[in-house]
Image (cartoon, coloured by chain):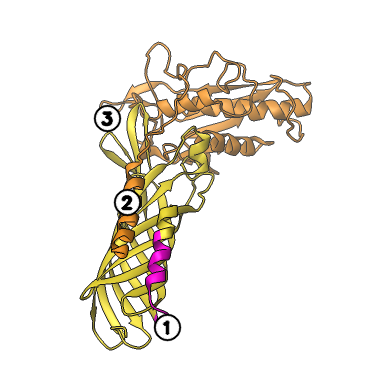
Chain colours: A yellow, B orange
């Protein structure tokens, strides 16, 4: 983690002094998540969110012609499913909030790479008693990277496609109480369509 | 070059995090016997019957004890295997809980040691073959609680709370008893909450195929 922070600091440092150009963006897409928990009680059991539609809002600024930094909040909601003996059973509706700081660097033409870090929070819907969320869920650190391709449609608007991967260590108080140790690394992949508005010109500087 | 090495650092961190898959499921206690004696069959409420509907006769603290007991048992699960609800109409219930003696004396519950000044009985209906050839209970499950006249009101309250939770364990499918007095499903329970062995037992039960289906209106001739 300290390496990541160091890398992010270096990225920010190499960017030229800011000539503020504010951007605002919305992304609509869907995310796949790897299982949150794997267990064996008589049978092998996995707990995995279904593919989750998501909505993302982001604000940021271009630091120079290549670098962009922003804050991003993502909301996604789907059913949490229990997989056992080939059957999938709904456990509860699950909302996932993700807040991140995103660093973007233009790579080639309209293609840019991103790295981000932040926090992820699970919010169970309905009665969570009898689930891994019955004692709530704390904020978990997440880090990720992505690629995006944008195309200007007006002076100030671009549309694009965004593919992102992130990882976090999933853990809840209920799992710790039940004797789980160490948490589990959860991987997520999201694909989104984006609409970005820029204060001045869609193509910066 | 520096920028490339920074990117490699970031990628390396992600790969390293991703590689740390830790299988960390806990070691659970060995379950005690939960099968139905003689027939050696298993019953638990199937997913199609969720939420399991309990009716508690509105007498004394019985509705509160039933709600608390259901919550405690439901909280023994991790993966949503059991969902329960309390209904106000006994004809809509899967399990009916009644007081078999007069209204118990009123006293708030305490943390005092449990004295068995009450008792409970869970009545399992007979099993029949339904129209599809599956074994099914022929009626609702019924639970009866009673207390011993002349007992201390506080002891009655504490006892009914524990015995209600114990009987709910039977209604959920634990048809046996634990041999360990620290378990709620011991034949003479002295603890208020399900133990880790109670938890392991009901968890194992709900991951086995059920041999008996619950009663449903119209399914049994």
Compared with residue A79, is residue A111 higher up or lower down, i.e. above or below? below
Inspect the magenta stretch and tell me whether residue A127 lies in it. Answer: no
Residue B91 horizontal/vertical position (percent): 49, 39
Range drawn in magenta: A7-22
State how far apart marks 3 and 2 are (Cα).
61 Å
Tell if the residue under mark 3 belongs to the same chain as the one under mark 2: yes
Tell me, for residue B43, which label it has, or none: none
Task: Look at 46% across and 41% down and name the residue there.
Answer: A131
Compared with residue A4, is residue A56 higher up or lower down, i.e. above or below? below
- State the residue position of label 1: A20
Q: Secondary structure at mark 1?
A: loop
Tell me, for residue B12, which label it has, or none: 2
Relative to A89, B152 lies left or right: right
Relative to A124, B2 lies left or right: left
Residue B30 horizontal/vertical position (percent): 45, 19
- State the residue position of label 3: B131
Tell if the residue under mark 1 belongs to the same chain as the one under mark 2: no
Q: Chain of mark 1?
A: A
Q: Chain of mark 2?
A: B
Say if mark 3 contacts mark 1, CB within 8 Å.
no
- Label 1 packing within 10 angstroms: few (<14), some (14-19), many (20+): few
Q: Secondary structure at mark 3?
A: loop
Inspect the magenta stretch and tell me whether residue A11 lies in it. Answer: yes
Q: Nearer the viewer, mark 3 or mark 2?
A: 2
């Amino acid at each position: 983690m300290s390496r990541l922070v160091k890398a992010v600091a270096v990225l920010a440092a190499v960017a030229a002094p800011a000539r503020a150009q504010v951007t605002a963006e919305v992304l609509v897409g869907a995310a796949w998540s790897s299982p949150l928990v794997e267990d064996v009680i008589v049978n092998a059991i996995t707990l995995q969110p279904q593919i989750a539609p998501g909505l993302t809002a982001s604000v940021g600024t271009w630091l120079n012609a290549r670098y962009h930094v922003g804050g991003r909040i993502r909301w996604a909601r789907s059913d949490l499913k229990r997989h056992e003996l080939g059957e999938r059973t709904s456990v509860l509706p699950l909302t996932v909030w993700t807040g991140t700081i995103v660093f973007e660097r233009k790579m080639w033409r309209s293609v840019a790479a991103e790295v981000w870090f932040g926090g992820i929070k699970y919010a169970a819907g309905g009665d969570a008693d009898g689930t891994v969320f019955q004692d709530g869920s704390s904020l978990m650190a997440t880090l990720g990277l992505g690629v995006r391709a944008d195309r200007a449609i007006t002076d100030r608007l671009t549309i694009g496609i965004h593919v992102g991967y992130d990882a976090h260590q999933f853990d809840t108080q209920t799992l710790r109480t039940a004797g789980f140790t160490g948490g589990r690394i959860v991987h997520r992949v999201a694909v989104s369509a984006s609409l970005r508005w820029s204060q001045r010109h869609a193509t910066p500087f | 070059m520096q920028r490339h090495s920074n990117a490699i650092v970031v990628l390396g961190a992600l790969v390293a995090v991703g590689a740390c898959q830790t299988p960390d499921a806990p070691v659970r206690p060995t379950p005690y016997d939960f099968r139905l004696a003689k027939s050696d069959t298993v019953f638990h409420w199937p997913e199609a019957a969720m939420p399991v509907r309990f009716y508690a006769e509105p007498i004394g603290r019985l509705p509160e004890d039933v709600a608390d007991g259901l919550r405690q048992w439901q909280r023994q699960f991790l993966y949503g295997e059991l969902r329960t609800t309390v209904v106000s109409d006994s004809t809509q219930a899967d399990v009916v809980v009644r007081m078999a003696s007069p209204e118990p004396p009123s006293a708030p519950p305490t943390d005092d040691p449990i004295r068995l000044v009450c008792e409970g009985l869970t009545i399992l209906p007979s099993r029949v073959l339904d129209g599809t050839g599956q074994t099914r209970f022929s009626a609702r499950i019924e639970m009866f609680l009673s207390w011993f006249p002349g007992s201390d009101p506080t002891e009655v309250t504490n006892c009914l709370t524990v015995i209600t939770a114990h009987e709910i364990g039977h209604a959920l499918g634990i048809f046996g008893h634990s041999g360990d007095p620290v378990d709620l499903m011991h034949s003479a329970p002295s603890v208020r909450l399900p133990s880790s062995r109670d938890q392991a037992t009901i968890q194992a039960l709900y991951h086995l195929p059920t041999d008996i289906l619950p009663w449903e209106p119209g399914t049994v001739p």
